[in-house]
Image (spheres, rainbow, N blue to C red):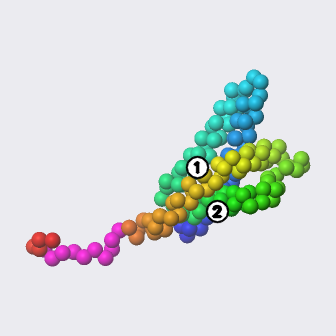
Amino acid sequence: MRHLGGLLIGLVVTAAVLGGGGWAVQQAAANAAANPPDSQRMWIALGAMAAVGLVVGLVTAGRISPLATFVPSLVLLAWTVVYALDTNRALSLVPAEPSINRILLEAGTGAKTLLTTGVYALLGVALFIPVLMPSRWSRRDDELDEDYENSPEGSYY
């Protein structure tokens, strides 16, 4: 049951990184290019980036199933490998249809920026590291040594 919850949390983290992170980067880049820059728009973009960073940090450092970090790392690293092997195919996965919601188009533009600059590769590797730690795969109850042998009273050790 713990790993099913980790899988669901991993899907939410993937959506937060791809959607929220992409939207925030696009908003920040558009605001930096604007003349004069809109400070309210920049604060919203920075707040969204901080929220995505908080979610990623809590999942990475938290004591939940390693699937919560494996799912987003797999998506980010797979997309980066596809980009390295076939750039056009990887960029065709970014939403670009004019009939799509404006927020999704902005998130796609930001996701393309994060993909082409290598940020997704960096984040994918960082999210994959907790999967390699054996302590993340065991339950908290397993950490208690139930097979502890009591030494006879009066013994030195």
Query: Residue at position x 53%, y 63% from top?
Result: 131
Screen quadrant of the C terminus: bottom left
Q: Tell me where the magenta segment starts and ends, as one range.
A: 144-153
Query: Can I make out residue 99 in this image?
Result: yes
Which residue is at 59% across, 67% downward?
4
The quarter holding residue 89 reads bottom right
Which of 148/81 is in front? 81
Q: Residue at x 22, y 75 (%)?
A: 150
Residue 40 left/right relative to 139: right
Q: Position of residue 100 (x, y in %)?
A: 85, 49
Task: Please tell me which residue is depicted at 58% across the width and 49% down the height of the picture.
Answer: 55
* Mark 2 → mark 1, Cα distance in angstroms: 17 Å
* SS at circle 1: helix
Quadrant (top left/top right/bottom left/bottom right) for the N terminus: bottom right
| Residue closest to the eye, 75 or 136 | 75
| Amino acid, disc 2 | Leu
Q: Position of residue 77 (x, y in %)?
A: 65, 59
Of the two numbered discs 2 and 1 on the same chain, state the one appearing first in sequence.
Answer: 1
Give the residue at mark 1.
55
Q: Which mark is residue 1?
A: none
Question: Callout 2: few (<14), some (14-19), or many (20+) C-alpha neighbours within 10 Å?
Answer: some
Look at the picture and state if 60 lies above or below 43: below
**View extreme (top): residue:** 36
* Horizontal and vertical percent position of residue 97: 88, 50
Q: Regarding mark 2 in the picture, which secondary structure is present there?
A: helix
The secondary structure making up most of the magenta span is loop
The correct choice, above or below, for 50 with respect to 118 in the image is above
Amino acid type of the residue that numbered disc 1 sits on in the rendered structure: Val
Which label sits in the foreground, 2 or 1?
2
Label 2 sits on residue = 74
Percent x, y for residue 146?
A: 33, 74
